[in-house]
Image: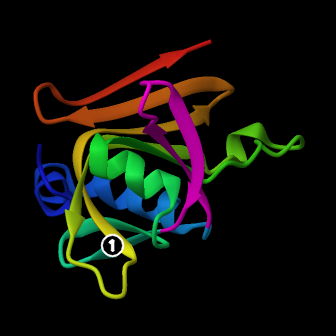
Amino acid sequence: MPSWAEFAAAQPEFAARVRRLMEARKHLTMATLRRDGSPRISGTEVQFTGGQLRIGSMPNAVKARDLLRDGRVAIHGPTTDPPDADPNGWVGEAKVAGRALALDSAEGSHSFAIDIDEAVVTSLDRNRLVVESWNPRRGYERFERD
């Protein structure tokens, strides 16, 4: 799976939009897999540094234990509603799915770099749902639906 830098090099304008959305709010939602394979939803913060999308975690947090056991992860945000007065003014939402790779961390905290398997932006255009996505196998795609 490509790093954030590789994704950004392959699709710079789309990657910049995903990044802007993910940086628009401090708290995002992250999905990991529990030991039994069921999903776990947690809050997270992201950082873009050194060509990587990174997340951190407090020592022994369950989301960190999930990622150390199975690195598959999805991050979503910002979660906002379209404005009632102008739904097309909605900034949209971004989603990134991939694999978390543990980095060296100080004092028992956890830090992970996220390699990108898929990035998605969902927005509105003339009251139609627009879904844009990128993955390394098929590249960039866009489709609209009512």
Residue sitting at x 36%, y 87%: 107
Q: Is residue 45 above or below residue 132?
A: below
Q: In the depicted view, which residue is nearer to us: 123 or 1?
A: 1
Q: Is residue 139 left or right of residue 35?
A: left
Q: Judging from the image, what secondary structure is the residue with disc 1 in?
A: strand
Quadrant where the image shows the C terminus: top right
Q: In the depicted view, which residue is nearer to us: 52 or 81?
A: 52
Residue sitting at x 29%, y 52%: 68
The three-letter amino acid code for the residue at tag 1 is Phe
Q: In the depicted view, which residue is nearer to us: 41 or 130?
A: 41
Q: In the depicted view, which residue is nearer to us: 55 or 124?
A: 55
Majority SS type along the magenta span: strand
Q: Position of residue 25 (x, y in %)?
A: 62, 67
Indicate the quadrant where residue 138 lies. top left
Q: Position of residue 59 (x, y in %)?
A: 46, 72
Residue sitting at x 59%, y 50%: 42
Q: Is residue 14 above or below residue 87?
A: below
* Extreme-right residue of the structure: 85
Indicate the quadrant where residue 82 lies. top right
* Res 71 visible: no
Q: Is residue 108 above or below residue 6?
A: below
Residue sitting at x 50%, y 53%: 62
Label 1, on which residue? 48
* Extreme-bottom residue of the structure: 107
Q: Position of residue 45 (x, y in %)?
A: 51, 67
In the rendered image, residue 43 lying in the magenta stretch gets the answer yes
Quadrant where the image shows the N terminus: top left
The span shown in magenta is 27-45
Q: Is residue 51 left or right of residue 118?
A: left
Q: Position of residue 112 (x, y in %)?
A: 29, 64
CA neighbours of label 1 inside 10 A, class few (<14), some (14 to 19), many (20+): some
